[in-house]
Image (cartoon, rainbow, N blue to C red):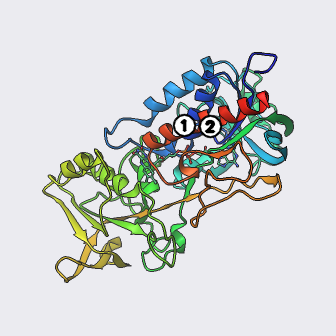
C-alpha cells in the first residue's frame, strides 16, 4: 500500500461501459485511477444505441448510474478528449504520456446553446454517422457527459469569426486553449478501447453506398433514436418515405473469408431488437430477416421466441447474395433459402445490413519490449508479455453490455492484484 493508503494507480484507456466499470470497481477497491477517453464525452458506443436488448430500456439509465459513481467515488481522474501517446517503463512501473486535446470551452459552460445559434460552420454529426450535421461548436448529444460544449478544431482551425465568444454570457469560450501533455506512472493498464463498426463500404453486392436506402445496424440505432437525424422517425433516407417493408441482412460481411471472419456475437440480438423499433412505428410493415443462424444465447432465447410471434415477420435462413435497386427507390434482396432450396427475391423499402464489429486500434506507442498480443481477429488477449497489461470488454471480444460489465469487474480485480504485487515486491 502506498503512502496515501492506496493500492497504486491504474490507467484505464477508454471511457465506454467497460472502461467506466473497470475504473469505478478499481477505485472502490482502493486504487487511484486515470481514465482516458478520446471522445469529448463518456459512454462509448452505447450512447449511440436507442434501446438495450432484451428489456428495451434506454441505455441512458445504465450509464447514468455509472456517471454518478464516477462523480462520487474518490480517486478517479477522468480525462476526455485525451489519448495515450506513449507507454514506457518496465514490470509494473509504466510511464504514460497522455495528450489532452483542447475542448476550447471551459467548465463555466452551462450548455445553454447560445453559441450554436451564431456559429456559421457546419460539420457532419459523428454520433449520427454523418446522417445529420452539427455546428463547429456543439454538444455531442443531449445529456452528454460532461454536459459541456466542444469546438471541432478541424473545421474551425483558426477560430477566426469569434461569434461564439460574444454570444456566450458565461465567458466559457477559450479559443486559445492549447493541447496539454500529462505524464503519469501507473502499476497496471486496462485497455477498454472497445469496437468500431466494420466498414460496410468494403462489402460488395449489398448496395451500401450506392443507395441511401441501404443502411447499417448502427445507423438504424440512430434512425430510431429521438436524438437521431430524423428525430426518431424510421424512414427511407432517399425521400423520407414510410416503411411498408424492410429487410435485415444478418452477417453482412461477417463470418466471411473475404471480409470479417469472426461472428460479432451481438448483431442477431441487435436486429431482433430493431424489428421492435420498426413494429412500434409501423404495425403493418412486412419485416424479413435473412440469417445464417440466429445467435441468441441463454435467456436471450426468450426474446427471440417472443419476436417470432410477430405474424408479419418472416425469417429466411439464407445468406444474401445481392441487393440491387428496384422501382421507385426500393431495393431487391436476393438469397437462397437453404431450408427449401428455393431462390428468394424480396422487394423492400429499406435494407439494414447487420455489419460486424472490429476492435479499435488504440494507436499507442509502446516501448515495453514487445507489442500487445492479439487473437487472429485483432482483439486483445489477456496473455500479454508483461504483467498488469489487461484488456476488458469489446477490446477483448465482441460481447453485449452485461458481459462487458462482468468482464471489466474481473479485470479491475486483476489489475489491482498486479498493483498490490508491485507494492509488496
Ligand atoms: C447494432 C448494435 C446494437 C447493439 N445493441 C446492444 C444492446 O441493445 N444491448 C447490449 O447489451 N449491447 C448492445 N450492443 C453491444 C454494445 O454496443 C457493446 O457491448 C458495448 O459498446 C461495449 O462497450 P465497450 O466499453 O467495451 O466498448 P465501446 O463502447 O466501444 O467503448 C470504448 C471506448 O474507448 C474509447 N477509445 C478507443 N480508443 C481509445 C484511445 N486510443 N484512447 C482513448 N479512448 C479510446 C472509445 O472512444 C470509446 O468511448 C450492440 C452492438 C451493435 C453493433
Can you tell which quarter of the image residue 2 is in? top right
Left or right, residue 96 beside residue 169: right
**Viewer-closest of 100 and 402:** 402
Residue 2 sits above or below residue 164 on the image: above
Work out which quarter of the rendered image holds the N terminus and state it.
Answer: top right
Marker disc for residue 414:
2
Q: How far apart, in angstroms, are the residues tagged by discs 2 and 1?
A: 7 Å
Left or right, residue 180 beside residue 8: right
**Viewer-closest of 297 and 187:** 187
Left or right, residue 117 beside residue 330: right
Q: Position of residue 238 (x, y in %)?
A: 41, 64
Residue 7 sits above or below residue 197 on the image: above
Q: Residues within 10 Å of mark 1 (few under 14, many from 20)?
A: some
Residue at 29 percent across and 57 percent down: it is 242
Question: Can you see residue 178?
Answer: no
Q: Secondary structure at mark 1?
A: helix
Q: Secondary structure at mark 2?
A: helix
Amino acid at each position: 500500500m502506498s503512502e496515501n493508503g492506496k493500492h497504486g494507480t491504474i490507467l484505464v484507456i477508454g471511457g465506454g461501459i467497460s472502461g467506466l466499470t473497470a475504473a469505478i470497481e478499481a477505485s472502490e477497491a482502493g486504487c487511484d485511477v486515470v481514465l482516458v477517453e478520446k471522445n469529448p464525452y463518456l459512454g462509448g458506443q452505447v450512447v449511440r444505441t436507442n434501446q438495450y436488448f432484451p428489456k428495451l430500456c434506454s441505455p441512458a439509465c445504465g450509464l447514468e448510474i455509472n456517471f454518478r459513481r464516477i462523480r462520487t467515488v474518490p480517486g478517479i481522474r477522468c480525462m476526455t478528449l485525451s489519448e495515450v501517446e506513449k507507454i514506457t517503463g518496465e514490470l509494473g512501473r509504466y510511464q504514460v504520456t497522455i495528450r489532452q486535446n483542447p475542448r476550447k470551452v471551459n467548465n463555466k459552460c452551462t450548455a445553454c446553446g447560445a453559441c450554436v445559434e451564431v456559429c456559421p460552420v457546419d460539420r457532419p454529426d459523428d454520433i449520427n454517422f454523418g446522417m445529420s450535421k452539427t455546428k463547429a461548436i456543439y454538444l455531442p448529444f443531449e445529456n452528454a457527459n460532461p454536459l459541456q460544449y466542444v469546438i471541432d478544431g478541424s473545421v474551425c482551425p483558426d477560430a477566426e469569426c469569434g461569434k461564439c465568444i460574444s454570444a456566450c454570457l458565461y465567458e466559457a469560450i477559450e479559443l486559445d486553449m492549447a493541447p496539454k501533455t500529462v505524464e503519469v506512472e501507473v502499476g497496471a493498464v486496462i485497455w477498454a478501447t472497445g469496437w468500431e463498426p466494420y466498414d460496410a463500404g468494403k462489402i460488395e453486392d449489398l448496395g451500401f453506398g450506392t443507395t441511401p436506402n441501404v443502411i447499417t445496424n448502427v445507423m438504424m440505432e440512430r434512425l430510431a433514436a429521438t436524438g437521431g437525424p430524423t428525430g426518431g422517425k424510421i424512414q427511407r433516407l432517399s425521400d423520407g418515405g414510410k416503411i411498408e417493408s424492410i429487410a435485415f441482412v444478418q452477417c453482412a460481411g461477417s463470418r466471411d473469408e473475404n471480409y470479417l471472419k469472426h461472428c460479432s456475437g451481438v448483431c442477431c440480438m441487435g436486429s431482433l431488437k430493431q424489428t421492435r423499433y420498426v413494429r412500434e412505428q409501423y404495425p403493418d410493415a412486412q419485416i424479413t430477416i435473412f440469417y445464417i443462424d440466429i445467435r441468441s444465447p441463454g435467456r436471450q432465447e426468450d426474446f427471440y421466441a417472443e419476436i417470432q410471434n410477430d405474424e408479419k415477420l418472416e425469417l429466411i435462413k439464407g445468406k444474401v447474395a445481392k441487393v440491387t435497386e428496384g422501382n421507385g427507390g426500393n431495393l431487391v434482396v436476393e438469397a437462397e433459402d437453404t431450408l427449401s432450396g428455393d431462390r428468394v427475391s424480396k422487394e423492400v423499402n429499406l435494407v439494414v445490413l447487420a455489419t460486424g464489429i472490429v476492435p479499435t486500434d488504440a494507436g499507442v506507442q509502446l516501448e515495453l519490449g514487445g507489442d500487445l498480443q492479439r487473437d487472429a481477429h485483432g482483439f486483445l488477449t489477456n496473455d500479454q508479455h508483461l504483467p498488469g497489461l489487461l484488456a476488458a470488454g469489446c477490446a477483448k471480444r465482441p460481447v453485449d453490455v452485461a458481459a462487458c460489465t462482468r468482464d471489466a469487474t474481473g479485470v479491475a480485480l486483476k489489475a489491482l492484484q498486479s498493483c498490490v504485487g508491485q507494492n509488496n515486491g
